[in-house]
Image (tube, rainbow, N blue to C red):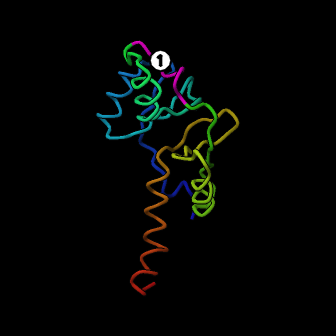
Amino acid sequence: MKLREIMTTDFCCASPSDSLSKVAGEMKRHNVGVMPVCQNGSLIGMITDRDIVIQCVAAGNDPDNCKVADFMTKELIQAHPDMEVSEAARLMGLPDAYRLPATYNEAYHLLGDGVVAPVVRHLAEHWMAPMLTGRP
């Protein structure tokens, strides 16, 4: 099965110039802990709730005065929508692959986000359930 068949395509992006307070509010509103950071339609990083809390707030900074660009992760592990789900699962096992955005070209145009939950759900339904129940 290809990643494009299960990936999330309804997502919101942060801008590198957004304040961390604004992004935290968007994360709360959408009930997510990570947001892709996009500029001119291209993925340039990821920002997490952990980035905001650990790197900004716990360091004594005011999230109203901190910009996403200064706290986002810039080096990303990415997937291609035509990648097999099993390969995406392997990538998710790599260090720092907490999310796996799906991009489709060298410019990193974002097609899907939040690939972790759909991959885990697929693996649970098609691999773990039969193993646990004894039924295919």
Determine the residue located farthest toward the left in the rendered image.
29
Q: Residue at x 44, y 54 (%)?
A: 117
Up-down relation of residue 117 to residue 10 (above or below): below
10 Å crowding of disc 1: few (<14), some (14-19), many (20+): some
User: Taking 80 as reference, is 54 left or right?
Assistant: left
Q: Quadrant of residue 87?
A: bottom right
Asked whether 117 falls inside the magenta stretch, the response is no
Q: Quadrant of residue 134?
A: bottom left
Give the residue at mark 1: 67
Asked whether 66 falls inside the magenta stretch, the response is yes
Question: Residue 127 versus residue 53: which sits nearer the camera?
Answer: 53
Question: Residue 134 versus residue 105: which sits nearer the camera?
Answer: 134
Q: Residue at x 46, y 61 (%)?
A: 120
User: Taking 94 as reference, is 34 left or right?
Assistant: left
Start and end of the magenta stretch? 65-72
Determine the residue located farthest toward the bottom in the rendered image.
134
The residue under label 1 is which amino acid type?
Lys
